[in-house]
Image: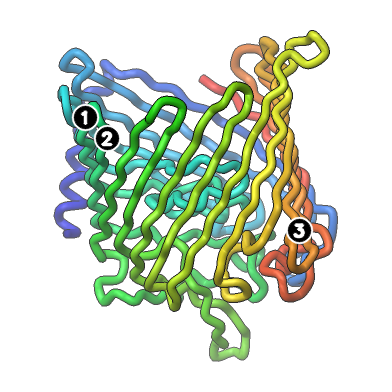
Amino acid sequence: MRIFIKSLLLFLIASASALSSAGEWSGSAGLEFRGFNQTAQDTRQDHDSNFSFVFESEYFHEWDDGDQSIAFVPYIRVDENDNERTHFDIHELTYLKVAERWELRLGIRKIFWGVTEFQHLVDIINQTNLVENFDTEDKLGQPMVNLALINDWGTIDLFVMPYFRERYFPGTSGRLRSIPETRQDRSQFESAAKEKHIDLAARYSHYFGDWDIGLSHFYGTSRDPRLLFSIDSGGNPFFIPFYDIINQTSVDIQTTKSNMLWKFEALHRSGQGTTYNAYAGGFEYTFVGIMDTALDLGVLSEYHYDDRDELSMSIFQDDIAIGARLAFNDVQSSEALIGLVWDRNSGGKFFNIEASRRLGNSWLLELQGRFFLNQKSSDLAFTVSRDDYTELFLSYNF
């Protein structure tokens, strides 16, 4: 299997090199600043501000009248304080062959499944990259073979994933990490094949009038590790990531009725210490042209539930989420999103704000804020309860 992966990567890199003179390059470079409101819980996290430099580029080339193409998206972050947050990743290195009734993709890709706003419950193909952001939106590129069978009655996607990507966790000096820290170098696997276990997935997707439906099944190494408590030889406590073999069946549904968008996701998972169900659902209603202006205001609400209760490894156990999305519809593409998640059991709250605005044709300014309120010691988010922060990100796109 290792020979297969190396051969595939060499083929894709060689193809990109051979075709680079005919392809198109684009990308962005940016500087990120985070300011933390409080002193961290762990004295080794001894910084209240942090700078990061981020660079991402994209190469794309197509030929054969667009029926064949290759895409390459490298990414690098250099962080001021956290060595684990400084990293390089290939978000995409993919060859695509398109035919009338099928599409074949080989290489490294990022796939997104799901419809809800506050948690992407069914999104399981790619590993979460926690050093990028606490919100689990950022993913690592996943090596795969993906065959899409396209018919009038829907699309069937088949996935073979020959190599597993471990989750990236913040390092000892990093903020927004578990207490005690999680050590990626101590990872354990249920499968004797470890990261070389072959994972499989299948998905059916189609639309029926106003309804968009996706049905999926995944078998393989869980992207969400259980955290096992341990103590090293020096008496220091830490968490060991343990990756189980799981089966997960899921559904995601979305429908639009006038200005109302309804969303629902649900899953049934076995193999991760217990068999459980989880679901998330809600709506988003958009007020178009409020007060006779160009502004559009979307209000949204969702409910998230996980029947493992206290055994859940998700912060969304029994939570209500509300939010608002404001689109200015101006030439600067200005927009803002605010959200609040309320834990019905503990009373803990998580407040989030995001905003962005283009500056000229090439610059983009983004604002982000994360605030953890009334977190109890029994809450999963308690370990980051002193990590409220405000972030500014300025990037140049070329």
Q: Residue 20, how many percent across, how many down?
A: 27, 23
Q: Residue 324, how many percent across, how many down?
A: 73, 34
Q: Which mark is residue 32?
A: none
Q: Residue 272's quadrant in the figure?
A: bottom left
Whether pointer 2 and pointer 3 mark residues with C-beta atoms closer than 8 Å, the reply is no
Q: Residue 305's quadrant in the figure?
A: bottom right
> Left of 17 or right of it: where is 393?
right
Element under disc 3: loop
Circle 2 crowding by C-alpha within 10 Å: few under 14, some 14–19, many from 20: some
Image quadrant occupied by the N terminus:
bottom left
Q: Residue 54, how many percent across, how many down?
A: 56, 39
The amino acid marked with disc number 3 is: Asp
Whether pointer 1 and pointer 2 mark residues with C-beta atoms closer than 8 Å, the reply is yes
Q: Nearer the viewer, residue 337 or 331?
A: 337
Q: Residue 237, how many percent across, how many down?
A: 61, 83
Q: What whole-number distance in Å separates the C-alpha atoms at marks 3 and 1?
A: 49 Å
Q: Residue at x 62, y 59 (%)?
A: 316
Q: Residue 14's quadrant in the figure?
A: top left
Element under disc 2: strand
Residue 392 seen from this side: no
> Left of 153 or right of it: where is 83?
right
Whether pointer 3 and pointer 1 mark residues with C-beta atoms closer than 8 Å, the reply is no
Q: Residue at x 43, y 43 (%)?
A: 113
Q: Which residue position is annotated with label 3?
A: 387
Q: Which mark is residue 151?
A: 1
Q: Residue at x 78, y 52 (%)?
A: 371
The amino acid marked with disc number 1 is: Asn
Q: Residue at x 50, y 77 (%)?
A: 240
Q: Which residue position is annotated with label 2?
A: 155
